[in-house]
Amino acid sequence: MSGGPIFIDRSLAADDVASSPITLGASSSEPVPDIPSEPEPTVPARPRPGAIAIAAILAAITAAVLWNMWPDAVAVEEPVVTTTTEPPAPPALSVDVYRQVAPSLVFIETTGADPDLNGIGSGVIVNADGLIMTSLHVVESADTIEVTFADGVAASATIVEEIPENDLALLIADASPNVIVPAVLGGVGRLQVGDEAYAVGNPLGLRSSLSAGVVSALGRTIPLPGGGVLEELIQFDTAVNPGNSGGPLLDRDGVVVGIVTALVSPSEDPGFSGIGFAVTFCGGVGGDDIGPGQ
C-alpha cells in the first residue's frame, strides 16, 4: 500500500469519520488522531407574530402615557399659515352719482297737433315741492306734457316758468311721487376742465340711463337755430342723444351743475359725435333754493 497522503472527504458526518478505521500506511501502528468537526450553521429565531402585536400595543400605550404626562414634549408643531385679506375695492364714482340722482329723475313725453312735435325728454326734481326743471325746447310747443317719476307715478304737468335765455323751463305736475327727492344743485364754479361729467336721462327713450365723460371746456357760446345764442355753456364729451335734453349733468359728487341742452353733429344725423353742451343756472347748493321767479 502506498504511504502517500490521505484526502478526507469532509462531506462525511463527524461520527462517521471517528468510527471509520483509517490506515495511514502498512508500516505504521499509531492511531489516527481525532479530527474536529465543523459546527453547524445556526439561523436566528424569527419573532412570532403575536410578539410583534404585543410590542406595537405597548408602544402605543407608552406614547399615550407620555402625551398625558408631558404633552408639550411630544406635540407636533403645525406650520403657521398666514393669509392677507384685501379690503374690497370702493365702488366707482359713477355708482354713487347714479344712486344719488336716480330718485330725482323724470321722464317727459309731449304731444302736439303736429305729430312732429311729439317727443320725449328728461327732467329733474329740484325742490321739496316737486318742481321739475327741464329744457324749454322739450316742452314749449307741446299741447300736453306727461311726466313719469322714478317710482312709476305718472301725471300731467304744466309749465310754470320759462327762461328762454338759458333754454330752461320749470314744470309742476298734477301728482307727486310717493317720496319727493330733490337733486342737489351747484354752480358752474365747482368745475374745471378735465373734471368728471355724468349725464343721466332717457336717450332714445331708454329710461334712466347714465353715461360718463369729462368736462371739455367752460364758457362756450353757441348760436340757436331760430336766432339768438346760448352763453356760458359747459362743453362735455359725455355721450348724449335725443331724449337726454332737459336731464341733469352732474359732477363727481352727484351735484347737478347743468342741464343738457344741445349736441353738435357734423352731419344731418342727430347722433352724438363727442361734443355736447349743458346750460348753467343760478341757485345755491340744495334744491329748496330753486322755484318760480328764482
Image (tube, grey):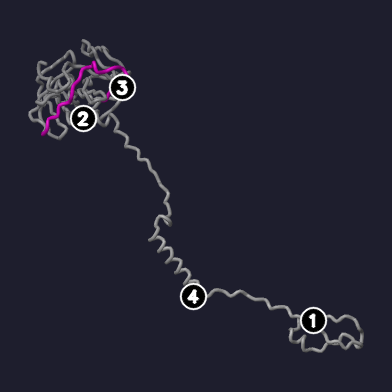
Q: Are marks 3 and 4 in contact (CB under 8 Å)?
A: no
* Mark 1 secondary-structure assignment: loop
Disc number placed over residue 214 in the picture, else none? 3
* Mark 3 secondary-structure assignment: strand
Q: Residue at x 40, y 64 (%)?
A: 65
Image height check: is 73 above or below 262? below
- The magenta-colored residue range is 178-198
Image height check: is 39 above or below 90? below
Q: Earlier in the sequence, mark 2 or mark 3?
A: 2
Q: Earlier in the sequence, mark 4 or mark 1?
A: 1
**Amino acid identity at mark 2:** Gln
Residue 137 locus on image (x, y percent): 18, 19
**Amino acid identity at mark 3:** Val
Q: Nearer the viewer, mark 2 or mark 1?
A: 1
Q: Nearer the viewer, residue 122 or 225?
A: 122
Q: Residue at x 46, y 66 (%)?
A: 59
* The quarter of the displayed image where residue 285 is located: top left
**Amino acid identity at mark 1:** Asp
Cα distance in 3D space between marks 4 and 2: 82 Å
Residue 33 locus on image (x, y percent): 81, 83
Can the viewer see residue 86?
yes
Can the viewer see residue 113?
no
Quarter of the rendering occupied by the N terminus: bottom right
Q: Earlier in the sequence, mark 1 or mark 3?
A: 1
Q: Residues within 10 Å of mark 3 (few under 14, many from 20)?
A: some
